[in-house]
Amino acid sequence: MSEQPTIAVLGTGRIGKMHAELIARQVPGLGLHSVFDVYTEGAAAVAADLGVPAAASVEEIMASDADAVAICTSTDTHVDLVVAAAEAGKAIFLEKPVSLNLEEVDRAVAAVKAAGVPLQVGFNRRFDPAHAAVQQAVANGSVGDVHMVKITSRDPAPPPIEYIKVSGGIFCDMTIHDFDMARFVTGSEIVEVYVKAAVRIDPAIGEAGDVDTAMLLLTHENGAFTYIDNSRQAVYGYDQRVEAFGSAGMAASENPREHTAELHTADGTRQQNIPYFFLERYIPSYLAEWEAFREGLASGTMPVTIDDGRAPLVAGLAAWKSYHEGRPVRCEEIG
Amino acid sequence: MSEQPTIAVLGTGRIGKMHAELIARQVPGLGLHSVFDVYTEGAAAVAADLGVPAAASVEEIMASDADAVAICTSTDTHVDLVVAAAEAGKAIFLEKPVSLNLEEVDRAVAAVKAAGVPLQVGFNRRFDPAHAAVQQAVANGSVGDVHMVKITSRDPAPPPIEYIKVSGGIFCDMTIHDFDMARFVTGSEIVEVYVKAAVRIDPAIGEAGDVDTAMLLLTHENGAFTYIDNSRQAVYGYDQRVEAFGSAGMAASENPREHTAELHTADGTRQQNIPYFFLERYIPSYLAEWEAFREGLASGTMPVTIDDGRAPLVAGLAAWKSYHEGRPVRCEEIG
Amino acid sequence: MSEQPTIAVLGTGRIGKMHAELIARQVPGLGLHSVFDVYTEGAAAVAADLGVPAAASVEEIMASDADAVAICTSTDTHVDLVVAAAEAGKAIFLEKPVSLNLEEVDRAVAAVKAAGVPLQVGFNRRFDPAHAAVQQAVANGSVGDVHMVKITSRDPAPPPIEYIKVSGGIFCDMTIHDFDMARFVTGSEIVEVYVKAAVRIDPAIGEAGDVDTAMLLLTHENGAFTYIDNSRQAVYGYDQRVEAFGSAGMAASENPREHTAELHTADGTRQQNIPYFFLERYIPSYLAEWEAFREGLASGTMPVTIDDGRAPLVAGLAAWKSYHEGRPVRCEEIG
Amino acid sequence: MSEQPTIAVLGTGRIGKMHAELIARQVPGLGLHSVFDVYTEGAAAVAADLGVPAAASVEEIMASDADAVAICTSTDTHVDLVVAAAEAGKAIFLEKPVSLNLEEVDRAVAAVKAAGVPLQVGFNRRFDPAHAAVQQAVANGSVGDVHMVKITSRDPAPPPIEYIKVSGGIFCDMTIHDFDMARFVTGSEIVEVYVKAAVRIDPAIGEAGDVDTAMLLLTHENGAFTYIDNSRQAVYGYDQRVEAFGSAGMAASENPREHTAELHTADGTRQQNIPYFFLERYIPSYLAEWEAFREGLASGTMPVTIDDGRAPLVAGLAAWKSYHEGRPVRCEEIG
């Protein structure tokens, strides 16, 4: 590995562009190698802004001297790119979800393990300082044996219907972050999923075969329970909270506010809303995620592995089965 | 009804004594008539302290000129006392739960409706100013259509095992408050209950046939979902929170602290715990409950009726069935 | 002293009535002996409500078997009543201020010391749990050497102009509590006072010779500085905060809210106001004050002595001198 | 002015390096032209990191095509550089304080006004979103007529003694930000200053002729009062709060925490500290400051003028005079 490893970013949509900027400008010790997108104009603009080449093809990147690739393309392309990168011996940063198809995930797992390349899945919320402090409080015993975890995860507004149609639905697109958080905080695998869900925000979401409002109960291998709720539209902002309760206490991450000013009048007290946009809320977590990737390149061990990418998909598929069958579903029923 | 209606308190255990003191000393416009307990020494002490007679028997109270009775005895005596009071034409304040047996509840319902006496069930949490503000925010449209309600209700320490054995178990003893809160906040009946529960705190609780840790998902008639969690032991205090989320926003009641002092040092910030004891937390709600009872005596309409006493018991029985059968249970399966 | 000492309350205006009710109903171990007021109808009503006699005269009370008197009459009568009670051998609870005249205060001091009776001045805020925790954090070393104290003390609305005319003005009526708090928290005497003040709320207050808005800087014997601000009208409620800063950290008591519910909408977050009425804010402090008086009767040592009553008056008079002369004034210039 | 104006940064110490990085990487619409420092190795390193030239001299920069200069050198060089830049027709960003000498400030004022170049003084705290919201609440009438402002501004640790010796002392180095904030929030000039100050943290600070602990009371032209406190060492972090109180309410900016996680155990509640480092606390304000500079270049009107740089120095000099003479000092006594 080079002294300052370089990373080629595949996919320069919203998330890929953000990663490219972070690597180029804000993460000491990593360099941006180049970018690529099938939408070449987008890639060219990002490349020009950041002063790196826009590659003409994926193959060009795989053949290059980039130390790693960051796969930020659409989900259906993930596994092929993982396989290609593994075969090219590149370290891999892979945006979630790995795939919507479990056999495809397994193909990626096999390729990565065969090649022995380091791979980190982009579950950035693990790196949020407040959520990470909750996990730490469990891991270091401050909350004692963990009995219950509560995760609230609500978007400020639904994505476009066209996106929803290819997203794998709320459980594989949105809840997948929360399944990962549940595993991360409890330190234990999910063994059962029960779901109540509905279309409450936009009938078009229902027509697309998805739901927009959900409550889930999970059972973990170690006996802990996790509660999750999701909504595609919290009009007051991007609501992201995690709470772990156990025999010795409770740790909780609350929402920050946009700023701390308050106004007190005869009508009561007013505060700012919580941040609306996920980048505003989670930018420190994306930065920390890249710092962890840099450490992982040095040590050879990544903090969020391809197996950590597989488990939440199993839970997501179990959630859909629970929703359709109106009963708790064991993860072992899925695979 | 008298200008200052008087109330005879039946049962002078912890909760009955508290009600007697509140009526005698802190609720303007109500008077304490007398007290009674089969444990005559306890009744005599309370009577002496508050300057009222200790009645020799329930019959003496029913034959007296007391305008109302407050039934604060053990649960298994509730229905007989309700029937006797109804027949005596007394207004009734009845501690929860009405009974652990649905047929018995129905006998109470019939007696009260036949006699036409006003009756209020002691779901005091409805009168907590913060929880009531959450309900108001739903009722007045501030949160829009209500999609999800979250209730966290955790005791600081388990009750004695002897109490647990006759309590009806966690769902009929503890969660019953939360079932009532779910109906109160959503303004809609519970139609389905799903439970995950376990013994995590004290094996003796399990040996008594009960659980001490539970997560529940409820479905309401209007399509809202409610999440509830219960623990018999939150070592940091009496944790009581309600949150209502809907199309226009979210209302939430947080835990107060014992006091507001903070200490900031190089090691971080420390705050006081939340109150440990339910009386400390909810004393304003008990006061407001009696003020509502006084208004109900004047208007003839009580805010928490015998029907409001029945519905949470159905949910509690459904919860036990869900726990034992590992599936969601419809309330109509119970009665 | 009797097993349950009894207290006769002199003065049944707002504050005297409150004390009488607390003693009669809420402080275990103390009994209300009787009440007296020159406005006999008021005294009779309080007496009837609380089930004690209304005395016909002060002399009747001084000659009675009451263990203590609570002096809650108008300020100009305080010293004569203190002297009479001291001569009668009664323990004394005395509302602030002792007097507006320093020589009169000294006459009270002499009488109390000559008679050797226990006396507690009614600086209730010392007993507020949050402010007391700030003082404790200083006393136990948690904040290290104390460098700076900040006290914000704002009323929700001005008192009647007729009251203001006889109040001794803002510094002897309102700030006197804050001078006491400054001495209490720092554990050190005030040696210098500097004032900036103005009439900003109601010109009638200025016409009465008073001000309604003030900022003060105090210097203590131990080198600490205290900042105080006062306003006669904080439209958002009764704003009461204390902060102590030192070499090892900071302790602060924040305002509680009326209740903890919050509403989050697209327009921001709304919370309840802080309490508006001083009784609502400070009732626990009045209760604790009486519990301390009860302990003081038993031990013979009161926590807030007549000397603690004198020092804040000196500071108040120094504040007026500073205001009129536009310069820092040493307390030794006053007496 | 160019489409994307370019800025040459003079001085690449801690603050200059930060400005250079922000301009180069994080402020859209501005470009970094070059950097200069008499410590050429430092300038070369920054230049290499950011991909711009390191100029060989100030003269080279003044003769270049840079649209603006950012003066981030030591205070004693400020005025000569302002004069040179003004004569070269450059727009100017100038770090605070303008100078420690009022005649020198006036020389800078004259040069800037003669040349008609836009100049912005680096009072970044005006651009902090929370403090700015407090100012807005005053400006838009939400707090009504402003009666009192409170500013708490405490550093986490003292600077090196060598720095203190050339800093102008606490009032010209640290309080100068608060004098600016007082003018900004009240919208009114400071007319009088009164100071209490002491050496409480490090005797070496006193030996250097400075103080480390201060409380100030200011009087404004419009009748408002401002309280300021400063400490060179708040062990719990960088404590920065502003509060404005008026006839219609109160607006306040509280300290953010490093993150929002809380731990609740039987021992109480623990939270993270507030940020320790001023860059961590105020980085959004520095970004907003540069966005305002960019707007100012376009419109020709800067939000913080050279006159805004002069007034706080007058207040700082008045503060020193008040400290030495133990009396309130009018600003007109200074100049």
Image: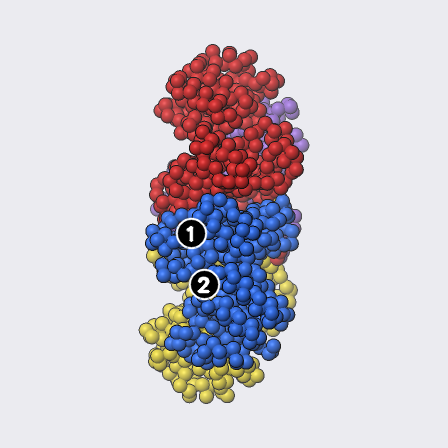
Chain colours: A blue, B red, C purple, D yellow
| Subunit bearing disc 2 | A
Q: How many marks?
A: 2
Residue name at image x 36 percent, y 72 percent: D295
Quadrant placement of the C terminus of chain D: bottom left
Residue name at image x 35 percent, y 24 percent: B299
Residues packed near mark 1 inside 10 Å, few (<14), some (14 to 19) or many (20 plus): many
Q: Amino acid at mark 2?
A: Leu
Q: What residue did someone put label 1 on?
A: A231
Query: Visible in this render: residue D127?
Result: yes
For residue B111, which quarter of the picture?
top left
For residue B184, which quarter of the picture?
top left
From the top left corner, tell me how far across and down residue D260 is, in percent.
Answer: 52, 55
Q: Amino acid at mark 1?
A: Ser
Q: What residue did someone put label 2 on?
A: A279
Q: Which mark sits nearer the N-terminus, 1 or 2?
A: 1
Query: Visible in this render: residue D324?
Result: no
Is residue D41 or residue D84 the one in the foreground? D41
Is residue B76 or residue C94 the one in the foreground? B76
Q: Which mark is residue C302?
A: none
Say which of marks 1 and 2 sits in front. Answer: 1
Residue name at image x 38 percent, y 76 percent: A41
From the top left corner, tell me how far across and down residue D237 is, in percent.
Answer: 57, 60
Is residue C109 or residue D50 the one in the foreground? D50
Quadrant placement of the N terminus of chain D: bottom left
Q: Is residue C122 above or below residue D285?
A: above
Residues packed near mark 2 inside 10 Å, few (<14), some (14 to 19) or many (20 plus): few
| Subunit bearing disc 1 | A
Measure how far apart labels 1 and 2 are at the Cα level.
18 Å
